Amino acid sequence: MVVECQGLSKHFGRTVALNNLTFSIKKNAITGLVGANGAGKTTLLKILAGYLRKTAGEVRVFGERPFNSLKVAANTIFIDDNLALPATLSIAEILEAGRLFYPGWDHGLARRLFDYFSFNPRQLHKNLSKGKRSTFNMILGLSARSVLTIFDEPTVGMDAAVRKDFYRALLQDYLQHPRTIIISSHLLKEIEDILEEILLLREGQKRLQLSASALREYALGLRGEEALVKRFIAGREVYRREHFGKNSLFVVLRNSFSAAERHKARAAGLEIMAVSAEDLCVYLTSKGGRGIDDVFNRN
């Protein structure tokens, strides 16, 4: 395993950012780190990159504690919106400097991406627009070809077309040069197809870790007459309830129905629906399975 965490916690004063996290990330896989704002994603990634010291528990990256580890620093690149780069160097000069810092640096890839996205080589990184800055940071992250590559919300400010190009470039380069990639994003729908595993955080705790394919089959939706739905879901793990009209109920629950139970539900007039991974992650991280409709439901 490239990353192993056991009971990992991180506190900032009285604020608990991470709470007793236990998980592992295998070698040469693309893992999606998913969760709402404040779930602890950035804190976790900075601990893995060696930027922050843990408060409690154990964390190992390449078998070492990442904080102040030369091995972790030499084999990891961390890309986020606040990437600190030399203020006096042009972006073309920053690309040239990449050769000195990253053993696996592919300058040919860096130049091809640089030209494809139409960068002005004389521009300074600090003067780039938000979207252009994210795109340039992405070029650094891909071209470094680090053993552990971490992207923290890498598409901030990018328009839809550039985001699509980024995900395609990431997948293409990963297939040719496999390495361990962790990418956090609020846009799970956009990255779902390139992920092999998904680690879902809720309020600093692990809510779920599954392969992307298993997550798609993890839950199902059930809709129909309220009393009938309630009878079928009795004793089952329910993640979301939504009322439609006076007597109709929609629920999302753990996919534990047998083929016979599905047939019985359909025969009784209930509708069984697939639940997207993105929607499921929202349901799993909401409090008590509540949605915005509950604000208007006074019952």
Image (cartoon, rainbow, N blue to C red):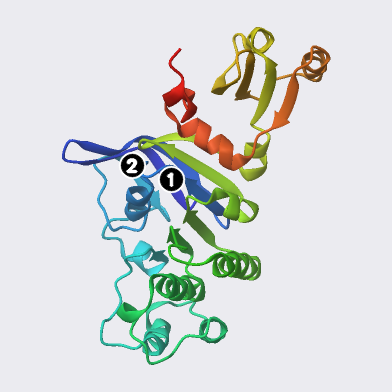
Q: Nearer the viewer, residue 213 or 153?
A: 153
How crowded pointer 2 is (Cα within 10 Å; few <14, some 14-19, many 20+) is rated as some
Q: Residue at x 44, y 42 (%)?
A: 35
Which residue is more in the foreground, 190 or 180? 190
Number of numbered discs overlaid on the protein picture? 2
Residue 64 in picture, x, y percent from top left: 36, 54
Residue farthest toward the bottom in the current orientation of the protein: 122
Position of residue 288 relative to residue 140, above or below, is: above
Specify the amino acid type for callout 1.
Glu
- Is residue 180 found left or right of 7 in the rendered image? right
> How much space separates mark 2 and mark 1, taking CA atoms?
8 Å
User: Is 140 rendered above or below residue 208?
Assistant: below
Find residue 144 and name its label: none
Q: Residue at x 30, y 76 (%)?
A: 85
User: Quick one: label 1, few (<14), some, or many (20+) residues within 10 Å?
Assistant: many
Q: Which residue is mark 1?
A: 4
Is residue 5 toward the left or the right of residue 109 in the image?
left
User: Eyeballing the image, is 10 above or below 20?
Assistant: below
Locate residue 175 relative to residue 187 in the image: left or right: right
Q: Quadrant of residue 29?
A: bottom right
In percent of the image, x 61 and y 8: which residue is there? 234
Residue 236 in the image, given as x and y percentages of width and height: 60, 14
Which dot marks residue 58? 2
Across and down, in percent, residue 59 comes to 35, 46
Q: Earlier in the sequence, mark 2 or mark 1?
A: 1
Instruction: Please state which of residues 58 and 86 is positioned toward the viewer in this rendering.
Output: 86
Q: Secondary structure at mark 1?
A: strand
Does the CB distance between marks 2 and 1 fall below 8 Å?
Answer: yes
Q: Amino acid at mark 2?
A: Glu
Kindly indicate the quadrant of the structure image that contains residue 125.
Answer: bottom left
